[in-house]
Image (cartoon, rainbow, N blue to C red):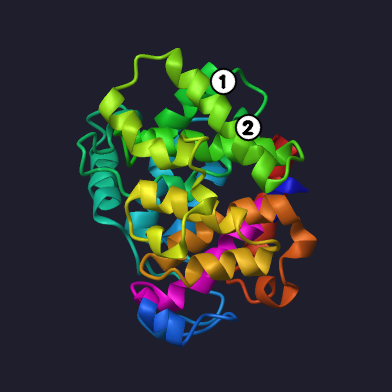
Amino acid sequence: MNLKSAILGLAVGDALGVPVEFMSREALQKNPVKILQEFGTHKQPKGTWSDDSTMTFCLMEMLAEGYDLQELGNHFVNWYRAAYWTPHGVVFDMGNTTRQAIRQLELGEVPPQDAGGKDIQSNGNGSLMRILPLIFYTKDLPIEERWQITSDVSALTHGHFIACFACFIYLEYARLLLQGKNALEAYQEVIVLVNDFAQTKDFPKEHLEVFDRILSASTPLYQLSRKAINSGGYVIDSLEASFWCLLNHHNYSETVLAAVNLGRDTDTTGAITGGLAGILYGEEGIPMTWVAYLARFNDIINLIDRLQIKL
């Protein structure tokens, strides 16, 4: 079941990154993550996932109940105020752009898709990290609808074109993986598909240019050196890092550990990469010793089952 492998892949990648979040690449080169760890940056038990998975689960809850942006906004507010869908009943990690957007959602003075920041500074990876379940809802829709829905769901917290388009590219890549394409085939196809789609739209040229390393067929992203790949909170860095890890490694464990060991925003790079790697390598590719440690494992499986029935 692709949904199950995607979500478990994402949550495991997140949990691998939580203990070493904010650590430098240099520090992780000396002492790389090889297994699930505990404590560390956020002093959490082994198998603890972060806001990346929490917000992913909120999106899944909404989709399981029926597509409703207002309800998704309510879930985010419930997380912020009442620790909804947290691993241990405590909110320990939340980005500033997301926090500001949730306060807008709580006020309820604008439509949910207008709550997220639309300025150039609002291009962190906070919508990319939670967007993956949406592809299971949109995958059979026309591309125009896929773009609109993806943009709307991103915009609850991150409404600038760059953040929305990064989510769109990520989901289009996931969609090709769901069709059975391998990592390279899917990447080559997504370049053509997204470039062709962009030519039909009046997207801002200066904002499209930031995707050049991802969408250029002449200088493939995967041929860049590890040193050239950034791993901070900027949405472009996260998207590039996830594709680079997927295209340069050959199983789930290698791919996700490579993502986490890039350093800095380790939980989010791990989650974004892990979700795609979960689709690519299947549930059997994810080490059960890692899956078994996930906080609230039974609740996660129950949510996956409920959404699967709805889909």
Q: Residues within 10 Å of mark 1 (few under 14, many from 20)?
A: some
**Picture coordinates of residue 153 (x, y %)?**
43, 34
- Seen from the viewer's position, the closer of residues 174 and 208 is 208
Residue highlighted by disc 2: 189
> Residue placed at 48% from the left, 33% from the top?
168
User: Of helix, strand and loop, which mostly describes the magenta segment?
Assistant: helix
From the viewer's perspective, tell me whether residue 4 is left or right of residue 221.
right
**In which quadrant of the rendered view does residue 294 lie?**
bottom right
Is residue 149 located in the magenta-colored stretch of the structure?
A: no
- Of labels 1 and 2, earlier in sequence is 1
**Picture coordinates of residue 285 (x, y %)?**
75, 63
Nearest to the eye among marks 1 and 2: give it.
2
Secondary structure under badge 2? helix
- Seen from the viewer's position, the closer of residues 181 and 156 is 181
**Picture coordinates of residue 148 (x, y %)?**
46, 22
Secondary structure under badge 1? helix
- Whether tag 1 and tag 2 are in contact, CB under 8 A, the answer is no
Q: Does the rendering let one see residue 154?
A: no
Q: CA distance from mark 1 to mark 2?
A: 14 Å
Residue 86 image label: none
> Residue placed at 44% from the left, 46% from the top?
128
The image quadrant where one finds the C terminus is top right
Which portion, as a residue range, is magenta?
Answer: 6-25
Residue highlighted by disc 1: 143
From the viewer's perspective, tell me whether residue 111 is left or right of residue 153.
left
User: How many numbered markers are drawn?
Assistant: 2
**In the image, what residue type sits under mark 2?**
Glu
**In the image, what residue type sits under mark 1?**
Ile
